Image (cartoon, rainbow, N blue to C red):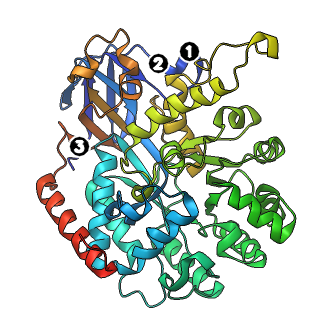
Amino acid sequence: MTQCDSWLIRNTSAILTGLRGDAARHAGPDIRITAGRIAALGSLQPLPGERLIDATDCVVYPGWVNTHHHLFQSLLKGIPAGIDQSLGAWLGAVPYRYRGLFDEQSFRLAARVGLVELARSGCSTVADHHYLYLPGMPFDSAQILFEEAESLGLRFVLCRGGATQARQAEGSACAGPETLEQYLDDVERLVRRYHDPAADAWRRVVMAPTSPPYSMPPEHLRETARAARRMGIRLHSHLSETVEYQNEVYSRHGLSPVAFCAEHDWLGADVWFAHLVKLSSEEIRLLGATGTGIAHCPQSNGRLGSGIADIVAMEAAGMPISIGVDGAASNEACDMLSETHAAWLLQRAKAGERALPRHAGGEQEGGAHAASVEDVVRWGTAGGAQVLGLDGLGTLQVGMAADLAIYRLDQPRHFGLHDLGIAPVVSGGRPTLRALLVGGRLSVDNDVMAGVDLAELGHQARAAVLRLQQAAGVRA
């Protein structure tokens, strides 16, 4: 990671800002960065002492803000027993089966693999929903996550998962849940040690029980909400990923999942949920009225056959929209470019599914109007910053943190494009990352991360996978 007080990014082909409407693009072609912040955009001349980045034939986006991940799953990709399973069976075959087999070395390696993969897609901020907490763990997994993110020059938000009651599907894979006191005491410890309330913080902590219908009894959910607000931190969890969430909450409480969360103080502008695939119109209205946000995970939801969250309707109702890649065990390409490409396509597909012939009352041919590239960039940058409460980043405008990705369009998939600005989202794949700056610090330079040997990282990952397979009794 290279530090420099002043940069001038010159001669960009396009700048997408993460803002709405006419402000979604800036003509540039230059961007000045001073003391970690954007100082100017326009036609600029170099100043003494500035370091220059030639962005000819490059496109600049705000750094992506990934609002939902499970980094430990970076060594659990493509497990055959779970590859064709929906959520419930997949949980038993993959994360529940393997999570107790991680030691400090394999956990640190998994975190590094995931963070490197994200950074090389242009992601500058990672919120990890980390639920790998078992009684008597011999290492501090939260410390490892913060250390690895810092070493790679990324902002990191720890969503402290966990449970005070076991889920039946976990079986012997769970060594027993924490008590509520243990859980809250550890969250308080993490907040004291790591949490920074600043609008452009490098480190944050979030209260994040793994899943409200399953992880805690109702009285514990209400207590975690009270404790989080007392500590000044946000709330996050999974919700309504499949119909089983609806089945579970209705059978136990006679309520929809969203109404259940509302009864236990788990809605509001300081709350965001991952997935929200299966919602009624009334649930969307309630989420919008309370300003509750979503981490939309289109690839994982597609991979597990869960469905497509209607984020266009959610945004219209007033919900903040962000994008997360979810865990690598249910999304074997864990990068924000693949995720935003999927979000762009699948929102159009969802709208297109509603198209009917005129004789049946239809008024549209398809759904290509549903989501523009500018919408997707806004969801994946400014929207992510909003749900995380990081108001000092997420857009390219004067005064904001200098978190930005510069993509060089030198791959055949980009040749022939009439609008270069849309390339990173619409073309699929990963363009060459000319640079990733986070707070004005150079984290990726010409597709290279300082101190990261990709070949060696791959070798270590393959060896770790073999050890996990052996520990799980799986024949390689």
Evaluate whether residue 95 shows in this view: yes
How far across and down, in percent of the image, does residue 11 sit?
26, 16
Position of residue 281 in the picture relative to residue 293 (left or right): right
Residue 269 coordinates in the image, percent (x, y): 70, 50
As shown in the figure, which amino acid type bears the numbered disc 1? Answer: Asp
The answer to whether the residues at label 3 and label 1 have Cβ atoms under 8 Å apart is no
Q: Position of residue 407 (x, y in %)?
A: 28, 29
Q: Mark 2 or mark 3: which comes first in sequence?
A: 2
Q: Is residue 203 above or below residue 440?
A: below
Q: Residues within 10 Å of mark 3 (few under 14, many from 20)?
A: many
Which residue carries the number 1 mark?
Answer: 22
Between the residue at mark 2 and the residue at mark 3, the CA separation in whole angstroms equals 24 Å
In this rendered view, identify the residue nearer to me: 84 or 424.
Answer: 84
Q: So how many labels did they put on this image?
A: 3
The residue that appears at 29% across and 34% down in the rendered structure is 430
Q: Residue at x 54, y 70 (%)?
A: 161
Which residue position is annotated with label 2? 25
Q: Secondary structure at mark 1?
A: helix
Q: Identify the mark nearer the N-term, 3 or 1.
A: 1
Q: Are marks 2 and 1 in contact (CB under 8 Å)?
A: yes
Instruction: Identify which amino acid the numbered label 2 is placed on.
Output: Arg
Q: Which residue corresponds to mark 3?
A: 444
Q: Tell me if residue 230 can be seen.
A: no
